[in-house]
Image (cartoon, grey):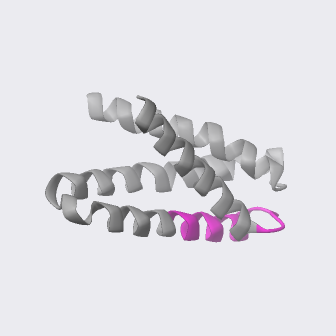
Amino acid sequence: MQYAIKLLTALLLTEAIEVPICMIFGIRKKQLLIVLLANLITNPLLNVIYGLFVLYAPAYSAVILAGLEILAVLTEWRIYCALTDAKRPFITSLTANAVSFGIGLILMRIL
């Protein structure tokens, strides 16, 4: 149960950070559901896979995290290309994920 709460918290924080960034980069309000759904696909999956690596192969967790973050950026970029009118979908995805990741790191240090 505690792990599920952590996953939900991570998803909600990601949404709270990435949605406004996507708005800044020109994704219209009507298309913000796409952003929410893209994060709903990538965030829990990334966190579960990363959690498994931390548990069973901690020596590789940093490399896995980097790879998973790259996959999240690429996946969301393709979703934004296909389903939104974002003018710079790759930069949008990269910026949103980088800011979200950075704030996540800071919060993990604090908490």
Q: Which residues are magenta?
A: 72-88
> In the image, what residue occupies the spot 80% across and 46% down?
30
Left or right: 67 with respect to 76? Answer: left
Decide which of 15, 40 is in the foreground and name it: 15
Where residue 42 appears, as percent x and y from the top left, is 48, 56
Q: Is residue 80 magenta?
A: yes
Where residue 65 appears, as percent x and y from the top left, is 38, 61
> In the image, what residue occupies the spot 48% across and 69% down?
71
Name the residue furthest left.
56
Decide which of 41, 19 is in the foreground and name it: 19
> In the image, what residue occupies the spot 63% across and 71% down?
78
> In the image, what residue occupies the spot 65% across and 54% down?
96
Rendered view: 94 above or below 110? below
Task: Name the dominant secondary structure of the magenta segment.
Answer: helix
Decide which of 79, 63 is in the foreground and name it: 63
Q: Is residue 103 magenta?
A: no
Where residue 41 appears, as percent x and y from the top left, is 49, 54
Left or right: 17 with respect to 11? Answer: right
Q: Quadrant of the C terminus?
A: top left
Q: Quadrant of the N terminus?
A: top left
Q: How many marks?
A: 0
Rendered view: 19 above or below 94? above
